Image: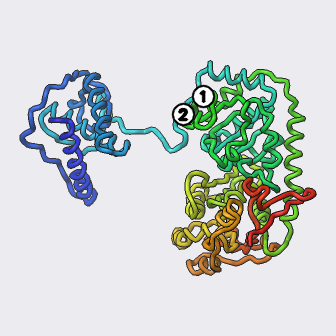
């Protein structure tokens, strides 16, 4: 039988097995029929040495023969070529190919396909070989670069005049926060993050520069931390995709800096910056790199003073936006959320301005507080569904999701899902009646904007109540704290519809000199009408 025929036959058998499973689940007994008139096949070299089969064939012991290595490799090669021709997804074809190999092997062995229904797998000693491994953690594997590469990277960092770390979401995915903190302290390197890397180390640490990204306009922390990166002679990227927003339009990393890049995905390294390739898990690589560090002559106290000055200037410039004024500024809403941050808190942001507000206005104080943003992963409407999943993952923690009114319009229906499923989160709608990023970016780039940027008035609190949740409208900044307390006490999903200033926007670098400017140390934003 040709292997292509075996694949097609395997697909038909798979459908048959699904029907068989339905019968078995209904309490019926079933024994597959033997296939009659099995075709003659060319002989395949086999060896009758009993050992664990390469796949979980679930065969009786006497059928546990193994294809010779050359035949096995030949069939795998055929499978790979067929995957390209037949346009199967890798996973689907792997499943189907396993079934085809099994079918092909059985026909060669005894001229029939007769599967036992016991579900047992046997090893070469005739013992049951049920799976016992627990694979419910991430990452499953922690590879790291070899010792020679680690030693070379450590030598570059030790000898650097001023090394800087820019950490991305890969640090959080790897659980590498503590390893990064240990590295930064030993190497005296300040740590900046991307939006997705926010909270990689506590942002109250003296070496933490917070998120830079494209939040470098007037009123942004990045306006004062980006200059700290510019003199760097060595930049260590960790789990960082070096995308446009994460590098302030690729202007963050100095042209003459030596770049070292740690990433589990080899395709990310060198994608936008030539770099020393440190392919591996962030935590395992950082641990090895820290152990390999020697001494340095950098003045850590001076570095920490520069970082502290940047934070202090940022706090002074944003202070006017934290007043109890109406309409409520988004900065004031985030200040209310800041008070609620704890070790188990999860803050989720939707796409667009919501993620910029969260990244630029919150200051993470606990290593276990999580901020989850959709940068590069999803678009508008992503926030609420993600928050529901986050609550299921950390049921004891408070989950707060920040969404804009435009983005939230994509996901209203999930309020009913949350009520029906008993999932309690706090939804904060920054309701300013516009698609803010669209309107402001059009104005900054083209001098005018389309009428599609304006939205009609929607009573989001009423929608929440109609779905069986808790909903209230907040029109005064002085009412925010009490509203958050009521939301936290609610036994159903709670929504705060906060009426915010349509003229406010995050300090994005695009608006520097177009919509925003500094006058005598005061941030002036020209509101878009």
Mark 1 is surrounded, within 10 Å at the Cα level, by few (under 14), some (14 to 19) or many (20 or more) other residues, namely: some
Point 23% across, 52% down: residue: 15
Instruction: Look at the numbered discs 1 and 2 and tell me whether their residues touch, using CB distance below 8 Å.
Output: yes
Quadrant of image for the C terminus:
bottom right
Q: Is residue 88 left or right of residue 235?
A: left
Q: Which residue is mark 1?
A: 277
- As rendered, which of 140 and 444 lies closer to the eye? 444
**Where in the figure is residue 382, as x and y percent of width and height?**
57, 61
Q: Vertical placement of 53 versus 434: above or below?
A: above
Residue 440 occupies quadrant: bottom right
Instruction: Look at the numbered disc 1 and give the secondary structure of its residue.
Output: strand
Q: Is residue 55 left or right of residue 489?
A: left
Residue 235 occupies quadrant: top right
- As rendered, which of 479 and 397 lies closer to the eye? 479
Point 17% across, 35% down: residue: 2
Mark 2 is surrounded, within 10 Å at the Cα level, by few (under 14), some (14 to 19) or many (20 or more) other residues, namely: some
Residue projecting furthest to the right: 520
**Where in the figure is residue 200, as x and y percent of width and height?**
70, 44
Query: Which callout, 1 or 2, points at the residue further toward the start of the chain?
Result: 2
Q: Which residue is mark 2?
A: 266
Residue projecting furthest to the top: 148
- As rendered, which of 248 and 3 lies closer to the eye? 248
**Where in the figure is residue 406, as x and y percent of width and height?**
62, 69
Q: Vertical placement of 271 versus 28: above or below?
A: above
């Amino acid at each position: 039988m040709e292997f292509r025929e075996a694949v097609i036959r395997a697909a038909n058998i798979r459908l048959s097995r699904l029907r068989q499973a339905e019968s078995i689940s209904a309490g019926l007994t079933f024994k597959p029929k033997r296939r009659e008139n099995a075709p003659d096949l060319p002989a395949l070299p086999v060896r009758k040495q009993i050992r664990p089969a390469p796949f979980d064939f679930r065969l009786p012991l006497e059928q546990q023969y193994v294809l010779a290595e050359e035949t096995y490799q030949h069939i795998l090669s055929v499978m790979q070529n067929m995957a390209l021709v037949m346009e199967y997804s890798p996973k689907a074809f792997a499943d189907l190919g396993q079934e085809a190999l099994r079918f092909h092997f059985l026909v060669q062995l005894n001229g029939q396909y007769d599967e036992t229904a016991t579900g047992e797998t046997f090893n070469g000693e005739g013992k049951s070989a049920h799976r016992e491994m627990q694979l419910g953690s991430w990452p499953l594997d922690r590879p790291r670069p070899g010792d020679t590469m680690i030693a070379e990277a450590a030598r570059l960092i030790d000898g650097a005049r001023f090394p800087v770390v820019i950490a991305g979401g890969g640090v959080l995915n790897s659980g590498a926060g503590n390893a990064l903190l240990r590295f930064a302290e030993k190497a005296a390197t300040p740590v900046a993050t991307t939006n997705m890397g926010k909270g990689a180390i506590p942002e109250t640490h003296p070496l933490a520069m917070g998120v830079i990204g494209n939040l470098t306009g007037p009123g942004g922390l990045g306006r004062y931390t980006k200059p700290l990166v510019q003199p760097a002679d060595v930049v260590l990227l960790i789990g960082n995709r070096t995308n446009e927003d994460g590098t302030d339009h690729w202007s963050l990393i100095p042209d003459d800096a030596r770049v070292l890049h740690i990433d589990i995905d080899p395709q990310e390294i060198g994608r936008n910056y030539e770099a020393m390739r440190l392919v591996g898990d962030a935590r395992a690589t950082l641990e090895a790199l820290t152990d390999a560090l020697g001494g340095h002559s950098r003045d850590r106290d001076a570095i920490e003073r520069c970082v502290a000055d940047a934070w202090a200037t940022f706090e002074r410039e944003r202070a006017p936006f934290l007043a109890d004024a109406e309409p409520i500024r988004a900065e004031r809403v985030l200040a209310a959320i800041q008070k609620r941050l704890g070790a188990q808190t999860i803050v989720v942001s939707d796409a667009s301005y919501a993620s910029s507000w969260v990244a630029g206005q919150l200051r993470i104080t606990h290593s276990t507080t999580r901020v989850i943003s959709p940068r590069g992963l999803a678009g508008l409407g992503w926030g609420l569904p993600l928050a529901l999943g986050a609550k299921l993952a950390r049921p004891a923690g408070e989950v707060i999701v920040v969404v804009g009114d435009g983005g939230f319009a994509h996901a209203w229906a999930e309020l009913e899902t949350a009520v029906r499923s008993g999932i309690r989160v706090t939804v904060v709608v920054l309701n300013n009646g516009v698609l803010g990023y669209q309107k402001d970016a059009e104005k900054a780039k083209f001098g005018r904007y389309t009428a599609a940027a304006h939205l009609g008035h929607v009573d989001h609190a009423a929608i929440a109540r109609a779905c069986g949740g808790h909903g209230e409208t907040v029109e005064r900044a002085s009412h925010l704290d009490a509203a958050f307390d009521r939301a936290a006490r609610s036994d159903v999903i709670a929504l705060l519809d906060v009426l915010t200033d349509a003229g406010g926007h995050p300090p994005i670098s695009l608006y520097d000199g177009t919509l925003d400017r500094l006058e005598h140390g005061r941030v002036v934003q020209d509101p878009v009408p």
